[in-house]
Image (cartoon, rainbow, N blue to C red):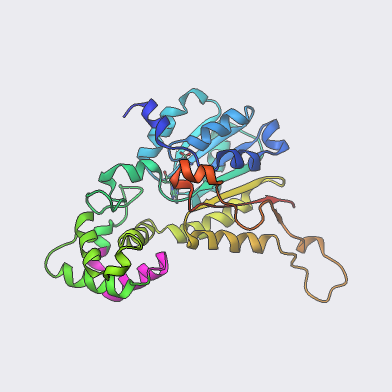
Amino acid sequence: MNTSDTKTLHTPVMLQRCLELLTTEQAERGAIIVDATLGLGGHAQHILERFKRSTVIGLDRDPAALTRASERLASYKNRFFGVYAVYDELPEVLEQIREREGITLPFAGVLFDLGVSSMQLDFAARGFSYAQNAPLDMRMDQSRGKTAAQLLAQLSGGELATLFRRYSDEPLAMRYAAAIVSAREEGAITESAQLVEILQRATPMKLKQQRHPAKRVFQALRVAVNDELTVLERAIPSAMNSLAVGGRVVVMSYQSQEDRIVKKEFAQRVRDNTPPGLPQQLPEHAPEYRLLTRGAEQAGAQEQETNPRSKPVKLRAAEKVR
Ligand SMILES: C[S@@+](CC[C@H](N)C(=O)[O-])C[C@H]1O[C@@H](n2cnc3c(N)ncnc32)[C@H](O)[C@@H]1O
């Protein structure tokens, strides 16, 4: 794949809205903006174009994504730094780059575009997609951790059911877990087509017409393989702690579990924590953030039509006020 293919692969979701929300005096004057989920560098490139005095630090835990994005953004060499890291490492990465490059700009914006990239989904060999047969890997970083096939082999029926319920609200969690346990007695489940077939067989006819039986199970396995929710629970607070006053955090989630984590963290930060009964607000208990979005925003109808990946998105943003 060459760089021009890379450019056409991913249409950044809610791009204009993200740029609008990241627009602050600091970003215009020159600041550090972190793209915590660099992917193919789609959002990052537009951020670099929009805020010409700002520096972008892009993180990704997938070395293949990082290589492609770094190739794409090579011409911004003094203003773009790509880093192989999990996004809960953001404060340490920020510190290291600041020190190494001697950057004193304030940290004024952070974007999280959660989940997998179109490249990860489209390249069958990664095993993320139930639509194409491939080894059941699903690791965003293929150099570490257990694969989906290993989880399917090692977890008990009860653990599998909990995983499907917790990470994707799968109503047939018990049934699917039992089907997997009985199928693996016949031989290891190592390929996505095998798993799809097991799930298809375990799904009642009338439900098969409503949605693809494998959709939620694949999602749950991916979340578990990459420990996505635990990492997100650490990453959002640490990014919000690190931002400068006036800085903004923008998060796009694609599943309800992710959005719940973001919503909860934002709610805590915008609350006035003055103990009840006191006659006036205490400055040290005043809200630390203000919300920039009313509830969660979705992509417009036209974008949803032209870019199906934008359909489930929920965007939330907040600004640090003290
Ligand atoms: C939806 S894509 C981002 C696409 C990007 N905004 C663009 O315009 O090209 C999400 C990316 O985040 C990465 N990612 C997911 N979880 C991560 C984590 N915990 N730490 C670092 N990167 C992560 C994935 O590897 C993937 O490349």
Would residue 154 be counted in the magenta stretch? yes
Q: Quadrant of residue 164?
A: bottom left
Residue 85 visible (yes or no): no
Taking the image as shown, residue 271 lies to the left or right of residue 249, namely: right
Residue at the (59%, 64%) spot, across then down: 264
Q: Quadrant of residue 16?
A: top right
Q: x, y percentage for residue 217? A: 33, 62
Would residue 318 be counted in the magenta stretch? no
Residue at the (32%, 68%) spot, across then down: 207
Q: Nearer the viewer, residue 174 or 53?
A: 174
Residue at the (59%, 42%) spot, across then down: 18
Magenta part, dominant SS? helix
Taking the image as shown, residue 242 lies to the left or right of residue 132, namely: right
Q: Quadrant of residue 262?
A: bottom right
Q: x, y percentage for residue 253? A: 51, 53
Image quarter where the N terminus lies is top left
Q: x, y percentage for residue 209? A: 32, 63
**Highlighted range, magenta:** 152-170
Q: Nearer the viewer, residue 249 or 243?
A: 249
Q: Nearer the viewer, residue 148 or 205?
A: 205
Is 268 placed above or below 242 here? below
Is 303 placed above or below 237 here? above
Is 84 placed above or below 276 here? above
Q: Residue furthest right?
A: 279
Give the quadrant of ligand 1: top left
Number of marks: 0
Residue at the (39%, 39%) spot, across then down: 65
Q: x, y percentage for residue 172? A: 33, 72
